[in-house]
Amino acid sequence: MTITPEWVSAVASTVAAVGVIFAFGQLRVSKNIAQLQFEDGLAKEYRELASRIPTTALLGAELSEADYQSSFDEFFRYVDLSNEQVSLRQRGRISPIVWQYWSAGIQANLALPPFKRAWSEIQSKCGSFQELRRLQAEEFKRDPHTWERA
């Protein structure tokens, strides 16, 4: 077998193509890992926030007025975090499968009496949280990623 410049060139081209394919695969894996870490960070933030909300509220029980008032800041932070999650999904920063779980969780929590009360109060006192308002107005049926960009 004689090694010719054409043969060397063909082998070099093949090796380069395999290298490009490998690099592309590595980039995809790195992107997926970064996406998972980002979503995990938000999930951790939710768990930390939920740990400061009375368990009885998370179970759907009414809170005493004193407990409600002392927990209102945490309910507000929950609404803020939920709105941020909707906004992130709208911009494509949250994957579709994770969004399905988060959307169901937001819907379930906002239906709980203490959360429902706080959300109603927040809406009446402040004009923010437009993304969460829209999601609720659409009854959680449309993926925010499909919304038209303003």
Image: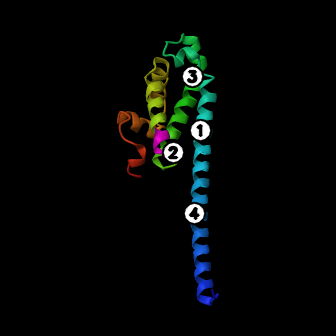
Residue under label 3, please give it. Answer: 72
Q: Between residues 113 and 4, which one lies in front from this camera angle?
A: 4
Q: Nearer the viewer, mark 3 or mark 4?
A: 4
Residues shaded magenta? 95-99
Q: Is residue 50 above or below residue 32?
A: above
Q: Which mark is residue 94?
A: 2
Question: Along the polypeptide, which appears first: circle 4 or circle 1?
Answer: 4
Dots 2, 1 in contact, CB < 8 A: yes
Q: Picture coordinates of residue 103 (x, y %)?
A: 45, 35
Upstream in sequence: badge 3 or badge 2: 3
| Residue at figure coordinates x 48%, y 50% from the top left | 91
Marks 4 and 1 close (CB-CB < 8 Å)? no
60 horizontally vs 22: left or right: left
- Which sits earlier in the primary sequence, circle 3 or circle 1? 1
Tell me the number on the disc at residue 135: none
Position of residue 82 measured from the top left corner of the image (x, y, whole percent) = 51, 35
Q: Is residue 141 left or right of residue 87?
A: left
> Could you tell me which secondary element the residue under label 1 belongs to?
helix
Q: Which mark is drawn over residue 24?
A: 4
Q: Quadrant of the N terminus?
A: bottom right
Q: Amino acid at mark 3?
A: Phe
Q: Position of residue 79 (x, y in %)?
A: 52, 31
Q: Secondary structure at mark 3?
A: helix
Is disc 2 placed on a helix, strand or loop?
loop
Looking at the image, is mark 4 or mark 1 nearer the viewer?
Answer: 4
Residue plotted at (54% across, 11% down): 65
